[in-house]
Image (cartoon, rainbow, N blue to C red):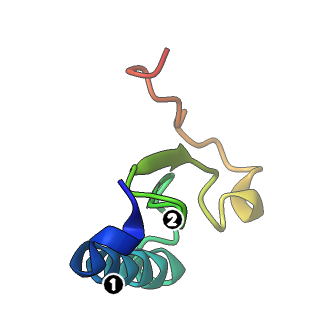
Amino acid sequence: MNLGTNLAAAVQLARLRNKLSDYYAVEGLGNPLRIRVPDEGYQVCIDVVEPAGEQMHSDVNQPSREAPWLF
């Protein structure tokens, strides 16, 4: 699907990208999952990242953040 053919969808995706960016900058900073929609299209991507601040407490025994449902 070409973004130029559906302006309404492109506008809503831009809003979603901005809201996701705002969320992960503040509230979702510690969330190990990142939802994003690349600029090139409509497909949603979910990335697993190390949460911010995790490195500061690396000497503390923390429970594993492994996702058992990911193979």
Q: Which residue is mark 1?
A: 15
Q: Which residue is mark 2?
A: 30
Q: Secondary structure at mark 2?
A: loop
Question: Residue furthest toward the left?
Answer: 8
Q: How many marks?
A: 2
Q: Position of residue 34 (x, y in %)?
A: 48, 57
Q: Nearer the viewer, residue 33 or 59?
A: 33
Q: Residue at x 45, y 47 (%)?
A: 46
Three-letter amino acid code of the residue under disc 2:
Gly
Rendered position, 29 above or below 51: below
Q: Residue at x 49, y 14 (%)?
A: 71
Q: Position of residue 28 (x, y in %)?
A: 43, 71
Q: Residue at x 27, y 72 (%)?
A: 6
Q: Nearer the viewer, residue 61 or 12?
A: 12
Three-letter amino acid code of the residue under disc 1:
Arg
Q: Position of residue 45 (x, y in %)?
A: 46, 48
